[in-house]
């Protein structure tokens, strides 16, 4: 295990905000998000085929994630608060352990179902129980990573910094669907991605434990309890003033709908529900419109292709458009949800692999702008000392979108394509109108506090 970094304990918060983060540390943070994202999207790309092979209705496949999502909402703020007191590294490691154990047990449960040792219903129930480990313990990692970065980034650069972290998750969503068909192996079959990504998770955990310095708090919990260096602070005087002003505010327990957070949480919830519905429907839509219901094993390739197209578009938004256009939280949120709504409308009428992939990519491009915008808006709405709690709120809002929205979207889609896609487009429209009148202007939100 790596020793504690002495500079983290003795350096002032303002000085640490100016100190560049090492490439090795950034690579470790990147790897944590990348591994979990790739594993989860690889799972999503094979679950429609597994559900069809087990003869389980589509809506029950979507509902199998609900308990895990509910646990994520409940547990993420708890782990975020623990990260303020125990350190970010400990919570990242806990999150990785939850991911590893969950993936291994999920794969084992589904494999038992596919080979006939368990009925389809029993296998799905065992899968849902194993998946809950990810919701309960895997939720410790993302808030810790976000707080690690956000607590040491100047306000004007925070959207881009959090977009970089989000892009690691986005890159994982490219890698997962691309590798999933290659991981369907002779003995384990469709559960191969579960087992392989559990092993990759073990490697990532070992690197995290051995190479990332300990960051256990050395002082009473304020902003300095979890500060560590991050690159990009070129105006030190402004940062000194900002840190001093923000640390004069005694942090308190953040609530979802307190006035500072209410607009950002609202758009995050509504837009997150729209995104969750699209992701829930996408795999089943590919199987239906390409006529692959009778040959579910052949569906992993097309489903993976569509998810990969969406992931590449997400990376384009986060690596290209946000930094190139210098989008702030409000601009990224509103432009993103507008583009997403247009892409979803296209997806509703797409009927071949090319049009489905293009439509899903456009929708994903929009959500790729929307998500970092709403995340950074939540971060900028609070002080530097409250970044750990803000990370927990963000993770909870994201998890809340997956409690019932994917199943609702699939259920509506099963009754009528227009019901499913119509509700998603309506949610995007509501977010745009509400955000236009409620979200704080970027020029004011990103202004350094002096």
Image (cartoon, rainbow, N blue to C red):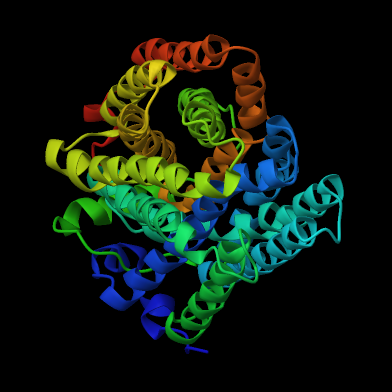
Q: Position of residue 428 (x, y in %)?
A: 43, 17
Q: Position of residue 304 (x, y in %)?
A: 44, 47
Q: Is residue 373 left or right of residue 50?
A: left
Instruction: Residue 62: tell me if it is visible.
Output: yes
Q: Is residue 27 left or right of residue 238?
A: right
Total numbered labels placed on residues in the image: 0
Q: In which quarter of the image is the C terminus?
A: top left
Residue depicted at 59% across the width and 33% down the height: 401
Pick whichever, 200 or 301, lies toward us: 301
Extreme residue toward the front, this view: 294
Q: Position of residue 56 (x, y in %)?
A: 75, 38
Pick whichever, 79 or 422, lies toward us: 422
Residue depicted at 81% across the width and 52% down the height: 123
Q: Position of residue 61 (x, y in %)?
A: 70, 39
Pick whichever, 18 or 23, lies toward us: 23
Asked if 29 appears above or below 22 in the picture, the reply is: above
Instruction: Residue 222: tell me if it is visible.
Output: no
Residue depicted at 61% across the width and 58% down the height: 190
């Amino acid at each position: 295990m790596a020793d504690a970094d002495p500079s983290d304990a003795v350096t002032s918060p303002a000085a640490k905000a100016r100190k560049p983060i090492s490439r090795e540390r950034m690579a470790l943070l990147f790897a944590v998000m990348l591994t979990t994202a790739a594993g989860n999207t690889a799972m999503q790309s094979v679950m429609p085929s597994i559900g069809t092979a087990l003869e389980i209705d589509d809506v029950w496949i979507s509902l199998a994630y609900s308990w895990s999502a509910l646990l994520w909402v409940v547990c993420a703020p708890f782990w975020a608060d623990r990260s303020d007191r125990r350190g970010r590294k400990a919570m990242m490691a806990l999150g990785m352990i939850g991911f590893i154990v969950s993936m291994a047990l999920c794969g084992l449960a589904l494999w038992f179902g596919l080979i006939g040792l368990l009925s389809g219903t029993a296998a799905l129930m065992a899968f849902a129980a194993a998946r809950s480990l990810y919701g309960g313990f895997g939720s410790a990692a993302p808030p810790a990573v976000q707080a690690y970065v956000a607590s040491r980034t100047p306000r004007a650069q925070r959207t881009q910094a959090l977009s970089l972290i989000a892009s690691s998750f986005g890159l994982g969503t490219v890698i997962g669907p691309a590798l999933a068909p290659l991981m369907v192996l002779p003995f384990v079959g469709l559960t191969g991605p579960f087992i392989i990504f559990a092993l990759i998770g073990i490697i990532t955990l070992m690197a995290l434990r051995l190479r990332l310095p300990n960051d256990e708090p050395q002082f009473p919990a304020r902003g300095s309890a979890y500060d560590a260096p991050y690159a990009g602070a070129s105006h030190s005087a402004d940062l000194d003033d900002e840190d001093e002003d923000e640390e004069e505010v005694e942090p308190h327990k953040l609530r979802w709908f307190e006035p500072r957070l209410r607009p950002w949480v609202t758009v995050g919830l509504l837009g997150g529900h729209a995104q969750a519905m699209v992701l829930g429907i996408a795999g089943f839509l590919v199987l239906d419109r390409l006529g692959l219901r009778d040959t579910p094993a052949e569906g992993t390739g097309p489903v993976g292709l569509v998810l990969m197209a969406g992931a590449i578009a997400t990376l384009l938004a986060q690596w290209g458009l946000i930094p190139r256009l210098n989008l702030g939280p409000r601009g990224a949120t509103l432009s993103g949800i507008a583009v997403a709504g247009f892409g979803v409308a296209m997806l509703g009428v797409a009927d071949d692999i090319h049009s489905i992939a293009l439509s899903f990519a456009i929708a994903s491009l929009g959500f790729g702008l929307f998500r970092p915008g709403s995340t950074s808006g939540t971060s900028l709405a609070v002080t530097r000392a409250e970044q750990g709690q803000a990370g927990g709120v963000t993770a909870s809002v994201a998890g809340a979108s997956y409690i019932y929205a994917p199943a609702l979207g699939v259920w509506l889609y099963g009754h009528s394509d227009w019901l499913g896609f119509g509700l998603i487009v309506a949610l995007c429209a509501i977010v745009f109108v509400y955000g236009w009148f409620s979200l704080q202007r970027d020029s004011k939100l990103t202004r350094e506090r002096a």
